[in-house]
Amino acid sequence: MSANAAAFDPFGEDYQADPPASLRWSRDEEPVFYSPSLGYWVVTRYDDVKAVFRDNVTFSPSIALEKITPVSEEATATLAKYGYAMNRTLVNEDEPEHMPRRRVLMEPFTPEQLAHHEPMVRRLVREYVDRFVDAGKADLVDELLWEVPLTVALHFLGVPEEDMATLRKYSIAHTVNTWGRPSPEQQVEVAENVGRFWQYAGTVLDKLRKDPSGHGWMPYSIRAQREHPDVITDSYLHSMMMAGIVAAHETTANAAANAIKLLLENREVWEEICADPGLIPGAVEECLRHSGSVAAWRRLVTRDTTIGGVPVPRGAKLLIVNSSANRDERHFDDPDEVDIRRDNATDHLTFGYGSHQCLGRNLARMELQVFLEELTRRLPHLELVPGQKFSYVPNTSFRGPEHLWVHWDPAANPERKDPSILAARQPVRIGEPSKRTVTHTVTVLSAERAADDVVELTLAAADGKPLPKWSPGAHIDLELGDVSRQYSLCGDPADRTTYRIAVLKDPDSRGGSRYVHENLRPGSTLTLRGPRNHFRLDPAARHYIFVAGGIGITPIIAMADRVKAAGGSYELHYCGRRTTAMALLDRCRRDHGDRLHLHCSTAGTRLDVAALLAEPAEGTQIYACGPDRLLTALEDASAHWPGDALHVEHFTTTQRVLDPSVEHAFDVELADSGRTVRVAADQTVLAALRAAGVDVPSDCEEGLCGTCEAPVLGGEVDHRDVVLTKSERAAGTKMMTCCSRARGGRITLGL
Ligand code: HEM
Ligand code: FES
């Protein structure tokens, strides 16, 4: 055992102050180790933590709620006095009992059902903010973040209003009882409260049983018990009545306090979301990743096995430190930075993963969004009171500051000048965030004619800050009047101050290009999303053939620039009707002179695609962008090339509306979450997964970007995306869930 492993103490100052930082040594040197002081094996790397979550049979969740500090005899006697019999709920239930119960109880967590709770959440947050908005100083935990999630939890569970106050009082005792290290005297006091909480939960349950017709998860569960008495037992209901409050309350209250603290400590990020509330869903997810409220979770090893190559014996107890996994640089770039546009933030493990993944995560996300939205709108000038020391309830798992003091100048509250901001509201996004919501405001620096009917725009961030990084092949989405259009970036990726795009006027345009040509002038402001790249350059090719048709030159020129700068071998074929209509031609001539081949149909130099691709060349990659006619010709002419040689960027998707008279319904089996989801004939796999509460990030939802990819473990896929290469399709190990379907009646996905 290493000295570090011997010294590890989850109740020590380092872990309590910052669990992921205190375990950096472990991620780097000893990612799975035995801690003698705790009697647990500790797992700290992303891949290992996820693998443990994924396999809930080898790694049983039965000890998830076990008391981490052995209970004194006196405390045990105290609990017995109250008939305390906390038993398995969901989170600590093994298979085969767990999944049938989870399935029967899921309905109230679907996005449609959760949407009904949004007005209640918003009303509560507003009422609480009203109470202190003019005070100039507040402890956000005491005055907002602690009580609102508790009240939301009680509403969600369907607890009668008159019982809320009593249940509120007891709920805190449970955390210390389960995850903390109370002294023997504290143990008895805690046990008294836990015992009373248990009894009161029973009383409320009896009341609900008499009339289970109301809204809420507990009445729903009582009704479900009638149909499934073996699955929903009395012991489950009583235990869940108590555990459900804790599951929904403290996790969310702590997550909110962590998030607001983190954002105020990173002032520029706070200000960005004040200016653009569209960034809030992404900020919520990044805060959950960076400073989540569940720092570690537990599992019991049920057979001799290995984790990350380290043998771990049957019977071993595991502390799986998901907060450490969330800061693992092997999975997240610059993991200690707060990047609210991070494209894989949703991969965090704060909600666990697999068949036990947090059922309430979308309720929690909703609450966090509403907190941030109301505070950034009403108190954008909020600041942390400097010099305060943050304290945490000592425990291994639940994490959030006990107090969060903030101050501001009430005279500067925006609502005093403009009461209309009170009515404003950003629609809450139920579910994981979409990259579609991340926006930037840019100003047009110049708009110059680049060819017949082509205007070249230079855009700069309105706040003067560097624009996000991009790589050749990337595009941005511009909001143009009522429509959103995609344009490839054609400038220099090293220049972080400006973006350049070239826009062809489409004679049939009803929005988009016409808007650009008619309305945009230097000084105009625009909203953009992205950049995103669905058309990445493989840096390892021996030779590149670039083919651009018309305005398709925009991504291609950025690629050619990159290959030239890297000293690579390439040729650039640029096709157009006549040279005056070919944008960026001067630049092509200047920068790519001897590599450039011009193909003008009016000059009789049309590209002979078949001749160009006659001989397959080992290590050559073809990148093409242009009209469908050109891309189809390239696809046909390269049929005898290796499967991955041709990469094309479509201007438009080939997606059509799903026609249920042509499509068939099928089942998707989810290997990691142990469920089967039915996909209707007029539904995408992505939509069916979402409706079943399974997180799958998405972006274009048109088969263009690759964000919604899922691993395929069995069954044949009917691929309909334009992302996968021929050989990837043939391998059949992944699919785009937003558009591709099963060929037969069933497919199995690694989700
Ligand atoms: C399970 C975290 C909010 C209900 C879990 C698990 C974690 C977690 C780590 C165990 C996952 C696993 O074993 O793979 C969180 C966090 C929250 C939050 C960080 C807030 C930010 C909520 C809310 C509710 C809720 C608001 C309820 C309304 C549940 C339930 C389970 C669970 C029922 C058990 C699911 C099962 O085992 O099948 N949560 N939770 N959680 N959570 Fe949450
Ligand atoms: Fe873009 Fe599916 S979301 S390919």
Image (cartoon, rainbow, N blue to C red):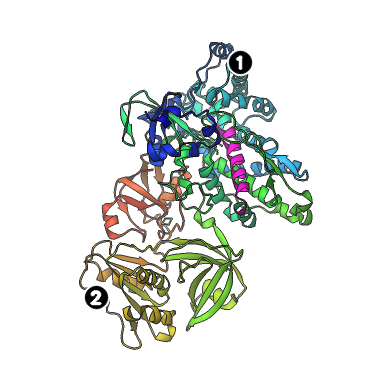
Horizontal and vertical percent position of residue 384: 67, 44
Q: Give the range drawn in magenta.
A: 247-268
Task: Ligand 2: give its quadrant.
Answer: bottom left
Whether residue 350 is visible to the viewer of this picture, yes or no, is no
Residue 610: numbered disc: 2
Locate the N terminus by quadrant.
top left
SS at circle 1: helix
Kindly identify the amino acid type of the residue bearing the numbered disc 2: Ala
Q: Is residue 554 left or right of residue 438?
A: left
Horizontal and vertical percent position of residue 703: 40, 58
Q: Does the magenta stretch include residue 74?
A: no
Residue displayed at 32% across by 81% down: 594
Nearer to the camera, 263 or 14? 14
* Residue at far bottom of view: 603
Horizontal and vertical percent position of residue 249: 59, 33
Mark 1, residue position = 185
Q: Residues within 10 Å of mark 2 (few under 14, many from 20)?
A: few
Position of 197 relative to 99 (above/below): above
